[in-house]
Image (cartoon, helix red, strand yellow):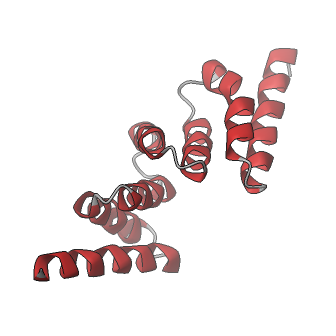
């Protein structure tokens, strides 16, 4: 492994650790050179999206998750995360669409719960 590749790998792992420690801004700083080095890696954009979401940079999170889906349309977690991001942006109809796709691909209880929350919110909004 070349030194540049090793540095990129270590920066990615450090950013993962920082996201896990709920230090999203530090994670984004660590991830910046990785995004430059690997602009077409879905895993890099997914981690960036998680960090943006964790730091309430919702529009950037949306862009990152959409990029992941563009690179890998079968990434059910990216669909789920995009749905949660859209939910936080109060774009419930769009969120519901993404969450339905995530549930259809992978019926994870967390995905189903998020879909239920958004669907209930839309029902309340329709009844007003």
Quadrant containing the N terminus is top right
| Whether residue 102 is situated above or below residue 25 in the rendered picture | below
| Whether residue 74 is situated above or below residue 33 in the rendered picture | below
Q: Residue at the front extreme?
A: 128
At x 46%, y 38%, the residue is 60
Q: Position of residue 77 (x, y in %)?
A: 51, 58
Q: Position of residue 85 (x, y in %)?
A: 43, 55
Give left or right: position of 41 versus 102. Answer: right
Q: 104 or 46, which is in the foreground? A: 46
Q: 115 or 106, which is in the foreground? A: 115
Quadrant in the rendering for residue 119: bottom left
At x 40%, y 64%, the residue is 102
At x 56%, y 44%, the residue is 52
At x 84%, y 33%, the residue is 10
Q: Position of residue 67 (x, y in %)?
A: 43, 37
Quadrant in the rendering for residue 27: top right
Q: Position of residue 122 (x, y in %)?
A: 22, 74
Quadrant containing the C terminus is bottom left
Give the tally of numbered discs: 0
| Whether residue 62 is situated above or below residue 6 in the rendered picture | below
Q: 86 or 128, which is in the foreground? A: 128
């Amino acid at each position: 492994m070349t030194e540049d590749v090793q540095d990129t790998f270590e920066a990615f792992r450090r950013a993962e650790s920082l996201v896990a420690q709920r230090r999203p801004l530090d994670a984004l700083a660590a991830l910046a050179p990785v995004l430059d080095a690997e602009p077409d890696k879905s895993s890099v954009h997914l981690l960036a999206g998680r960090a943006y979401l964790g730091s309430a940079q919702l529009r950037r999170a949306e862009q990152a998750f959409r990029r992941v889906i563009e690179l890998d349309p079968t990434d059910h977690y990216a669909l789920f995360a995009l749905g949660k991001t859209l939910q936080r942006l109060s774009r419930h109809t769009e969120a519901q669409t993404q969450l339905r796709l995530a549930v259809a691909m992978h019926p994870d209880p967390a995905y189903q719960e998020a879909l239920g929350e958004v669907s209930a919110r839309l029902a309340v909004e329709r009844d007003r």
